[in-house]
Structure formats: structure tokens, C-alpha cells
């Protein structure tokens, strides 16, 4: 994952594509693991989705389009997202694996999902599905 990002950064710098620059702001820190990178990228996509919606609501379509362009660039680094049916199947499997029997077990199920499907599903949407299935 780190190698792919480094290559993309180098290509972007050569092409002077400033939207693709991803700076390492944690110089001196322990390098992030692949799972941490996936979580960071997923969070970046979510932030841009929220910003694009706010710009649309504020009648600033040019800024909303810029946010969507950045989302597309970030998604290039994420694994393929699970579809709704695949997400539900994964959630049901996690519920069975943990033996969850009620909403009080939701944390266990979410922990399994985050471990197995980092970067592949929207966990805020998944938590709603988990809650619905455990009620």
C-alpha cells in the first residue's frame, strides 16, 4: 500500500498534478500500517462526501465538483467496496462468528467487520444494519 502511494505521489509530482499530492505529515512517527492507511483514506472520502453535499446545498457546484474529483482520486487507493448484498452477508457472518444475540453485542460485531473489511465498507451504514439485525 505504501509503495503504491509513493509511486502515485512521484507520478503526480512529475505531472504537476497538485490534487494527487499526499504529504506525509507524520514525519518522525512510526509508519502507519496498511489497515491504518485504509481507515485514513476511508475517512478522507467521507469528509469529502460531506463537503460536497455542503457545497451543493450552498449552491457552489464548482467546489462540490472539486470535492468529488478528490474522492475519485482517493478511491483509486481503496479496495473495491462491497455492495449492499455483500455487506449484509458479511454482517450476518460476523454476527454468527461472534455469537451476538442483541444490541449489547454490537461492538463485538463491528470489531470483526472493521478487522476483516477495512476500507471495503462504510461502517456508519454497516452499524445501522447491524443494529437492525440484532434488535
Image (spheres, helix red, strand yellow):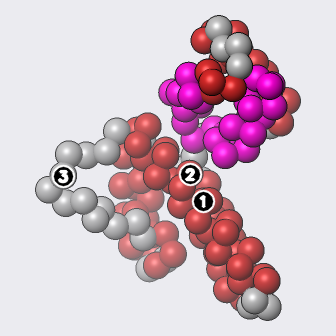
Instruction: Determine the main secondary structure of the stretch shown in magenta.
Output: helix
- Please name the residue shown 19% across and 60% down the image: 27
| Residue labelled with disc 3 | 29
In the picture shown, does residue 5 fall above or below 38?
below
Report whether 74 appears left or right of 102.
left
Front residue (pair 119, 73): 119
What range is drawn magenta here? 107-135
Residue contact at pointers 1 and 2, CB within 8 angstroms: yes
Residue 86, visible in the rendered structure: no
Q: Position of residue 80 (x, y in %)?
A: 67, 40
Q: Position of residue 104 (x, y in %)?
A: 63, 24
Dot 3: element: loop
Residue contact at pointers 3 and 2, CB within 8 angstroms: no
| Residue labelled with disc 1 | 45
Q: Quadrant of residue 116?
A: top right
Circle on res. 42: 2
Amino acid at each position: 500500500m505504501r509503495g503504491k502511494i509513493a509511486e502515485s505521489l512521484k507520478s503526480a509530482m512529475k505531472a504537476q498534478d497538485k490534487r494527487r499530492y499526499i504529504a506525509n505529515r507524520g514525519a518522525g512517527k512510526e509508519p502507519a500500517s496498511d489497515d491504518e492507511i485504509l481507515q485514513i483514506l476511508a475517512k478522507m472520502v467521507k469528509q469529502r462526501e460531506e463537503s460536497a453535499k455542503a457545497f451543493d446545498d450552498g449552491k457552489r457546484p464548482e467546489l462540490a465538483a472539486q470535492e468529488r474529483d478528490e474522492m475519485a482520486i482517493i478511491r483509486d487507493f481503496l479496495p473495491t467496496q462491497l455492495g449492499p448484498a455483500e455487506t449484509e452477508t458479511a454482517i450476518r457472518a460476523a454476527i454468527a462468528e461472534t455469537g451476538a444475540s442483541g444490541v449489547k453485542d454490537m461492538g463485538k460485531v463491528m470489531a470483526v467487520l472493521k478487522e476483516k473489511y477495512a476500507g471495503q465498507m462504510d461502517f456508519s451504514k454497516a452499524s445501522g444494519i447491524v443494529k437492525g439485525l440484532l434488535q
